[in-house]
Image (cartoon, rainbow, N blue to C red):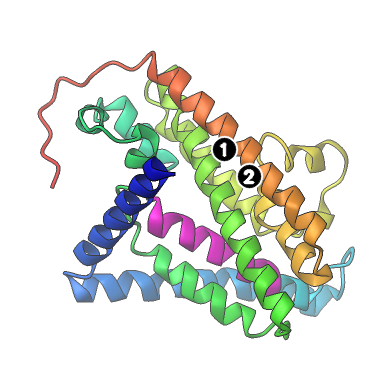
């Protein structure tokens, strides 16, 4: 427990320093947030027009889309605010030999690498998600509690999957493009109604690209106020993090230090 408290304190310090650094340039800070909110809004309008034209499709309508976007964007925003070094950026660090900087510190390597960067634009995702939730009408205390819990667990799914996608660089060398494709697929499928997929493609969203655990499952948890399904999501988070940790540290054995001199501030 003492070691856990130290690690949590260290992570809080990292996140605080990242936020303070990002807010140093206020104009850039605000423009990135607003830009991301506009970007999400454009994508969201597409779905509003789609359901306005075609009505309910396999149990999904406008209300479900509001909730899906609320959960997914809050989770994605939270994940990238606290853990910006996942996905393609992690692949870049590995391929360029830039893990050397982190290896010299007496801290948990994976957590230090992942949580040492903040994506400022992700704050726009977070804000957009909370605004979208205001249109769901789900304001019962239990629904709000399930929303927050499911969003945090979905954020952990995003982070773990980003670790897996980025760790491909250990095995493939320059894997930024592959990591980017996998990361893009995750984001795309999370924002699609789960009921549109059947058979093998649906199985795919629960295994190789676990988008269902960051979108569809949280939506069901909130709508049905289902604590058992929340436990299922928690179990999925544990499994995905176990896989991510194994992939990262097994790949670390293949890591080759970089020859470039890098200055980290």
For label 1, the crowd category at 10 Å Cα-Cα, with few meaning under 14, some 14 to 19 and many 20 or more, is: some
**Does 256 appear above or below 3?**
above
Name the quadrant containing residue 16.
bottom left
State the image coordinates of residue 260 (x, y, percent, origin top left): 13, 25
Task: Tell me: 240 left or right of 119.
Answer: right
**Does 184 appear above or below 228?**
above
Are the residues tagged 2 and 1 within 8 Å (C-beta)? Answer: yes
Label disc, if present, on residue 241 of the rendered structure? 1
Region in magenta:
66-83
State the image coordinates of residue 182 (x, y, percent, origin top left): 55, 38
**Could you tell me which residue is drawn at 71 percent across and 36 percent down?**
207
**Does 37 appear above or below 167?**
below
Label 1 secondary element:
helix
Q: Nearer the viewer, residue 229 or 29?
A: 229
Name the quadrant containing residue 131.
bottom right
Label disc, if present, on residue 237 of the rendered structure? 2
């Amino acid at each position: 427990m003492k070691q856990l408290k130290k690690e949590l304190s260290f992570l809080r310090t990292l996140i605080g320093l990242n936020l303070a650094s990002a807010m140093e340039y206020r104009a850039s800070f605000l423009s990135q947030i607003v830009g991301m909110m506009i970007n999400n809004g454009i994508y969201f309008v597409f779905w509003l027009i789609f359901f306005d034209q075609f009505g309910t499709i396999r149990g999904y309508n406008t209300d479900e889309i509001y909730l899906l976007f609320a959960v997914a964007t809050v989770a994605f925003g939270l994940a990238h605010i606290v853990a910006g070094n996942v996905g393609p950026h992690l692949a870049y660090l590995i391929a360029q030999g830039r893990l050397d900087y982190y290896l010299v510190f007496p801290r948990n390597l994976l957590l230090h690498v992942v949580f040492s960067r903040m994506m400022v634009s992700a704050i726009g995702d977070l804000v957009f998600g909370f605004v979208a939730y205001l249109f769901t009408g789900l304001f019962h205390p239990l629904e709000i509690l399930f929303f927050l819990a499911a969003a945090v667990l979905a954020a952990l799914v995003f982070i773990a999957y980003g670790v897996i996608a980025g760790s491909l660089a250990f095995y493939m060398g320059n894997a930024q493009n592959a990591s980017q494709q996998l990361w893009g697929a995750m984001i795309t499928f999370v924002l699609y109604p789960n009921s549109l997929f059947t058979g093998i493609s649906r199985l795919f969203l629960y295994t190789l690209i676990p988008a269902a655990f960051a979108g569809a499952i949280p939506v069901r948890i909130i709508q049905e106020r289902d604590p058992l399904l929340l436990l299922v999501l928690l179990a999925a988070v544990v499994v995905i993090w176990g896989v991510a940790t194994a992939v990262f540290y097994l790949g670390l054995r293949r890591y080759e230090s970089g020859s470039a001199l890098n200055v980290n501030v």
